[in-house]
Image (cartoon, rainbow, N blue to C red):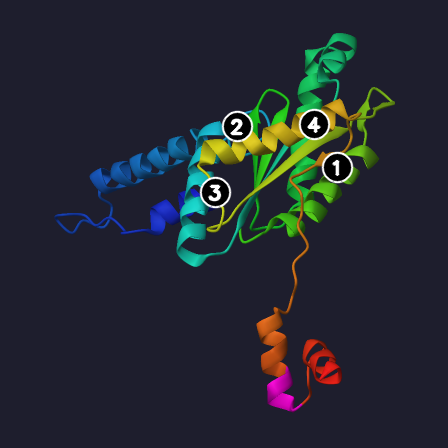
Amino acid sequence: MSSSQNSAANKSPLTCPVGMRDCPVLTEATELRLEVAKLAEQSRTDTLTGLANYRAFREALGQEIERTQRSDQPTSLIMLDIDHFKQVNDSWGHEVGNRALVHIASLMVQTVRKLDIPCRYGGEEFAVILPDTDLPASLPVAERLREAIAAHPVPVAGQKLALTVSLGLSSYTTKEKKTAEELIEEADKHLYQAKERGRNRTCHPEIKPVDAVSPDERQALADLFGAPTKDRSENESRE
């Protein structure tokens, strides 16, 4: 029994209306509740890879965008696509192609953090939602994924099928609001940039340098400790 089924069984335990210890109606109702929970889980899971499917991906992305709006913590998105996947199907057959998809999904689960949400977007394209993660922090995650996939070929009949992926990033913050569709489009745009630039690489929006301490904060620290800032020292020397 899966954790979701266990939680469904343990939530609001059913009781027999007439107080019978072995109530057939109660047993049937419990089984129906578990079956409904199982079907609900299956409707959100990609049957081939076991990852969250497109429907679950869109729901989760919407939830994380709402969380960002409430908490002001950013959400980032990785879109990745297997390079030359058509050649894999043409040369090795669709069964091996399916094995490659399962292989990629397994590496994704092993590589990303537990709070991240790996999904199958469709075909040979996957996505990873990164909660509480800004754009600079999402880049190492994407690179770990890319390197892990390149380093672990798919074993096929005593041979090794090498695979690479191209990745695109985008990020959502309250300062630069986007819709879920715009977030996906931006990540997809950078994914195709990676394809055009030779594949097996990660492309992303410009990462702007951040000044950790603003001029006002520097001045406040200087006033607190009685030391003039560089700007103030220069002005005093000119006087």
Viewer-closest of 211 and 179: 211
User: What residue is pinned by disc 1?
Assistant: 146
Spatial distance from mark 2 to mark 1, Cα to Cα?
22 Å
Q: Quadrant of the C terminus?
A: bottom right
Q: Earlier in the sequence, mark 3 or mark 1?
A: 3
User: Which residue sits at x=46%, y=36%?
Assistant: 180
Please state the horizontal and vertical placement of residue 106, each as a whole percent of the image: 67, 36
Instruction: State which mark lies toward you, 4 or 2.
Output: 4
Residue located beneath label 2 in the image: 46
Q: Please provide the residue range marked out in magenta.
A: 222-226
Find numbered disc 3 in the image and state the secondary structure of the residue it sits on. Answer: loop
Residue 223 magenta: yes
Q: Residue at x 47, y 31 (%)?
A: 181
The disc labelled 1 sits on which kind of residue?
A: Arg
Residue 8 location (% of width, % of height): 35, 45
Q: Nearer the viewer, residue 157 or 63?
A: 63
**Magenta stretch: includes residue 121:** no
Measured in 3D between alpha carbons, the distance from the residue under mark 3 to the one under mark 4, in whole angstroms, is 40 Å
Residue type at numbered disc 3 = Ser
**Separation (CA) of disc 3 from disc 1:** 30 Å
Q: CA distance from mark 3 to mark 2?
A: 16 Å
Q: Residue at x 39, y 55 (%)?
A: 70
Q: Residue at x 36, y 33 (%)?
A: 35
Which is nearer the N-term, disc 2 or disc 1?
2
Question: Which quadrant of the view contains residue 123?
Answer: top right
> Tag on residue 193?
4
In this rendering, the label closer to the viewer, 3 or 2:
2
* Residue 10 appears anywhere in the view: yes
Give the total of numbered labels.
4
Question: Residue 139 appears at what percent x and percent y?
Answer: 69, 46
Q: Which dot marks residue 206?
A: none
